[in-house]
Image (spheres, helix red, strand yellow):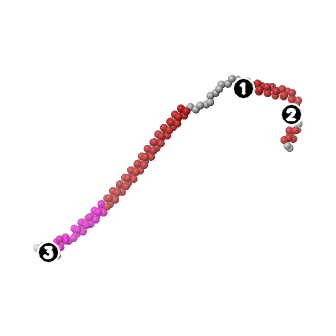
Amino acid sequence: MNRKDENTKVTPQAESLETLEPELREALGNFKASVNSWSDAMISRPREAKAPYRTNWGAVTKWALGCVVFVGTLSGGVYQNHREQEAAKAEAARVVEQQQREMAATQLAKENEEDLMANVDSDVAREVPNALEPLASLMTDDDSKGN
């Protein structure tokens, strides 16, 4: 079924509207007249001229500057904290490096001391110094017993 077919069909409501047609025409006419009179009244009434909305740039500027100061203060604190952490890391690395150098120096001194003691022991352990070797050859083991 097409829409046109539905619209062409006469319904019981349409028959009652046809009988009410003069009353309906009068009601629609009264409605139209009241809408027209209301429109004319609204057009002809005095109106205030409204100024366009203006932005208060002073308040906007104050807010912007306040935000800049806040962010600057906050970022300054964060940067200072970062610098202190980096300085602490550098100081810790410096202390560790210094301790390693001291340990290496101590180890080297210990090795040098051991080498020096070994040289002293070898020098002391010699039976006769080089300068006295001619005299040592004259001595015999029996002479060491004494007279």
Q: On residue 13, which mark appears?
A: 2
Left or right placement of residue 56 versus residue 117 in this view: right
Q: On residue 68, which mark appears?
A: none
Q: What residue type is labelled 1?
A: Ile
Q: Mark 3 points at which residue?
A: 143
Counting residues from the start of the chain, the first of labels 2 and 1 encountered is 2
Q: What stretch is highlighted in magenta?
A: 109-136
Q: Measuring 62% from the left and 28% from the top, which residue is drawn there? A: 51
Q: Measuring 42% from the left and 49% from the top, which residue is drawn there? A: 86
Q: Can residue 97 be seen in this view?
A: yes
Q: Measuring 88% from the left and 33% from the top, which residue is drawn there? A: 15
To which quarter of the image does residue 117 belong?
bottom left
Q: Which amino acid does label 3 sit on?
A: Asp
Mark 1 to mark 3 CA distance (whole Å): 152 Å
To which quarter of the image does residue 123 belong?
bottom left
Q: Name the residue under label 1.
A: 43
Callout 2: helix, strand or loop?
A: helix
Q: Residues within 10 Å of mark 1 (few under 14, many from 20)?
A: few
Q: What residue type is labelled 2?
A: Gln
Q: Is residue 142 visible?
A: no
Counting residues from the start of the chain, the first of labels 3 and 2 encountered is 2
